Amino acid sequence: MSGDITIKDVARKAGVSIATVSRVINKTGYVSESTRRRVEEAVALLGYSPNPSARILSGGTGRASSRKDILVFGSLNVDFVVRADRRPLPGETVPGRSFSLHPGGKGANQAVAASKAGGRVTIAGRIGDDIFSGVLTRSLLDAGVRGDLIHRVSGVSTGSAFITVDASGENSIIVVAGANGLVGREDVDRMLPVLDECGLILLQLEIPLDAVIYAARAARERGVTVMLDPAPPASLEPEVLSLVDYITPNRHEAEFLTGIQVVDVQSASQAAKTLVSKGVKCAVVKLGGEGVVYATRSSTDHIPGHKVDVVDTTAAGDAFSGALAAYLSEGRTLDEAVRFANAAGALAVTKEGAQPAIPWRGEIEKMLFGQ
């Protein structure tokens, strides 16, 4: 009988998604205790025995026991997205084709990306008390991200981003910090007990830089791997860069940090090596359709991009960084992790929006391995 029962049957019986059942089976991502009990009861009642594909869906290929938790400390935004044939010039009005509202923010996006890619993820940050904050918390929970460390601030708006996407899929973004601008060292102090249990912290620069540096130092003191997505770009002294194990700029951010104009693979390699010389252990420069260049003290390599139909590039970088963190947290090699993240970034541009466009692990593995 058990051989006839599938993960879909368990999901239907428990009244949850297939991804939620997979998280319970593989012990990855956040699931509330009541939901976990419902899934476990459905498994027992149906006599379900997980098959290898169920474990692959969110648990990876046999490395679940070595997986370390990920803490994401960063921004949480609501994205207001307008699509138009082209972006307006200064003083010009153009007709839009559609409007949509999505959960976003680099911190929240990367937490969702890491969780969807199979990581066990907690996010720390701040939201406002407006009507938009619920969009964020629902999306995080649906993706399996634990939100205990999200602090709600009264009388302040949730961070927001106003995004214009043109017919080619390229985007322009205006960000209003809102509650994100109030993040400080007290948020880091509050998350220290969770940080003590993590193997990697993922940071960005959409919250005050002082808080980011304070978090990086706290992680370094605890032997926790530090990954930084330096967006939006900010001046970072070598003392700060020396706290970073992995840095993941796009070509514009790499140029800002190094002064090297990144126009191709060769110049991206130069920029990556320059970042390593400034103290970073590994620099990964994202080149969009041209793929990725990464450098350490001993080597440099280029991973070509994937040919896909571009719909919206909004979440590509965040999908990449989250997937990279997830794979590294499993003890994968740098090359394995970069190739996995490269596929995640490629898949993200094939859909509209930020978090809704971020792929699940099964989708990434299908692109890479045909599973």
Image (cartoon, helix red, strand yellow):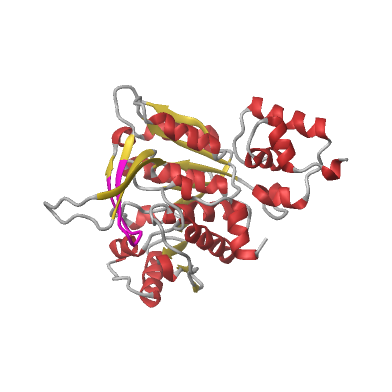
Main SS of the magenta segment?
A: strand
Horizontal side of residue 62 vs 127, given as left or right: right
Horizontal side of residue 92 vs 172, given as left or right: left
Q: Residue furthest bottom?
A: 266
Q: Residue furthest top?
A: 154
Can the viewer see residue 253 in this picture? yes
- At 81% across and 32% down in the image, what residue appears? 44
Q: Is residue 139 above or below residue 38?
A: below
Question: Depth check: 284 or 263 in front?
Answer: 263
Q: Is residue 72 above or below residue 134?
A: below
Question: Depth check: 2 or 62 in front?
Answer: 2
Q: Position of residue 191 (x, y in %)?
A: 48, 33
Q: Is residue 172 magenta?
A: yes
Question: Depth check: 165 or 130 in front?
Answer: 165
Q: Is residue 129 above or below residue 159?
A: above
Horizontal side of residue 362 vs 168, given as left or right: right
Q: Position of residue 54 (x, y in %)?
A: 72, 48
Q: Position of residue 108 (x, y in %)?
A: 44, 41
- At 37% across and 34% down in the image, what residue appears? 185
- At 47% across and 62% down in the image, what residue appears? 282
Q: Position of residue 151 (x, y in %)?
A: 42, 28
Can the viewer see residue 217 in this picture? no
Question: Depth check: 1 or 337 in front?
Answer: 1
Question: Which range of residues does the magenta coloring cover?
Answer: 161-174
Q: Residue furthest left?
A: 91
Residue 40: which quarter of the image? top right
Q: Is residue 339 magenta?
A: no
- At 41% across and 58% down in the image, what residue appears? 311
Horizontal side of residue 122 vs 26, given as left or right: left
